[in-house]
Amino acid sequence: MSGNRDRTISVVLNVHREGALVLPSLASIAAAVAVAEARGFDVEVLAVADRPDVATRDALAGWTGCPLRVLEVDNGDLGRSRNDGVAAACGTWIGFLDGDDLWSSDWLAAAAEADLASGAPTVWHPEVNLYFGARPALMRHPDWDEPGFDLAGLVEKNFWTALSFARRAVYLATPYRANELANGLGYEDWSWNMATIAAGCRHKIVPGTSHAVRQKANSLGGETKRVAALPHPSDFADLLRAPRR
Amino acid sequence: MRAAARLVSGLMRLPGLGGRTVARLRGFAWRLSGEGRTAEDEAARKARDVSARAAAARGLAEFRTLDPWFDETGLADVSGLKLRRSDRFGPVSAALRRAIADLHGVDHLVFFEAARLKDADDVAAGAEGRVALVATEGVCVVTSPAGPVVRFAEVLPRASEDEARLLVEMLIRAVVPRRITVVDRIARRVVERHASAIERNHRVDLR
């Protein structure tokens, strides 16, 4: 890093027990870093390892594809670990990646350029997600400004995945809530999406970009569904009392 | 298309249909009706679908080179994959928006099933502040006695149990009443399932 803070992107890779599957994610980060640096951005890469197993720790230790800082934490919770990544990051922006998922190589640069051109607090998402593994599918993210978009649907279904990109200030102002599955509260990403909107952020897509999300048999999402958890209560519902936007 | 939507809506009212069938028919009728979207919305949606598919195809080519195990998934191209949208605004969302508007400022929500209307009325008669009665059984009807006036608004005709449960969950969250009284099996299930979360924010009375 050259220390150009205004154009620095912090990558936060959240890992747990992915083992060697961390390596394709790191390769994806390295490809995105190369594109971002070619377009004038500085990038730092931080892995937040929450109670990692030996295989995951070894995979991180053996990585040489790009400079990597590893922060080991003992949270047992993805929401808290994301907050730890935000606290440890140095950049103007943060981009999250989960330990076995992939970005398209233009993701970091295109998201940062979109944010520089935007005049309002915005959380950025890829245009499309490619789910691979057990049940392959494509899922298109909605854009805040697209015709027919209606926020009311967000109480029924989460619109955007957790692999977001925004200014660090956005993540500091609206930290993630811990999952409390035993209390029927989960979906740290869905809760966060609603909370950021309540705080005045828009959620938009970066055209042309994509993420690949690995489908796993035993995922946090699956467990959250199994216990029929709800997102955390937030002020988001207040917005629905206003006329349809 | 609107005539077709009316026909499907008519089918939905046939006796003996299960909740899931009714929900599917309602969604189908909603899409046919075009409610909540314009022709411009539809044209924009199709253009965005094309754009998303192209982005996915470009992404796939990269992902196959980044992940040595990717090809083991058998995913060689995206042309055969169904493209879903992650957002949803359908009849349930629309019903919820109407209900939230109807119930703005309510202090006390009473969820009841049709057979226990008298019990719900008794609760409402003794309640403080603004109280609303919400029936969830089969037909989801909101009764909003704002002061002495009782107003019925049909929110979601023949709601399935899943839909009714969702509406109960979301109304609790959106209206944020100080008190909740439950004389209804669907609402009871919701409140019991999320007891710790709900009881943290509301005073709850199960009857």
Image: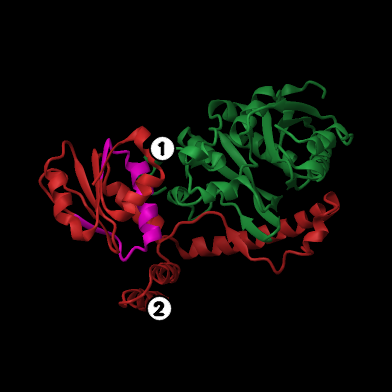
Chain colours: A green, B red
Protein chain holding label 1:
B
Protein chain holding label 2:
B
Residue B89 percent coordinates (x, y): 45, 57
Residue interval drawn in magenta:
B152-181
* The one of A207 and A175 positioned closer to us in this rendering: A175
Q: Could you classify mark 2 by the number of other residues whose Cα lies within 10 Å: few (under 14), some (14-19), or many (20 or more)?
A: few
Q: Which amino acid type is shown beneath numbered disc 1?
A: Ala
Residue B98 percent coordinates (x, y): 31, 53
Name the residue: 60% across, 37% down.
A118
Quarter of the figure that contains the N terminus of chain B: bottom left
Query: Does the magenta portion include A107?
Result: no
Name the residue: 77% across, 22% down.
A4
Q: Earlier in the sequence, mark 1 or mark 2?
A: 2
State which mark lies toward you, 1 or 2. 1
- Please tell me the numbered disc located at residue A196: none
Q: Are marks 1 and 2 on the same chain?
A: yes
Q: Quickly name the residue at label 1.
A: B197
- Left or right: A206 as drawn, with respect to B88: right
Image quadrant in which you'd find residue B153: bottom left
Residue B52 percent coordinates (x, y): 66, 58
Helix, strand or loop at disc 2?
helix
Q: Is residue A38 visible?
A: no
Q: CA distance from mark 1 to mark 2?
A: 43 Å
Q: Which amino acid type is shown beneath numbered disc 2?
A: Ala
Q: Quickly name the residue at label 2.
A: B4
Query: Does the magenta portion include B162?
Result: yes
Name the residue: 83% across, 39% down.
A30
Q: Could you classify mark 1 by the number of other residues whose Cα lies within 10 Å: few (under 14), some (14-19), or many (20 or more)?
A: many
- Left or right: A65 as drawn, with respect to A108: right
- Left or right: A114 as drawn, with respect to A188: right
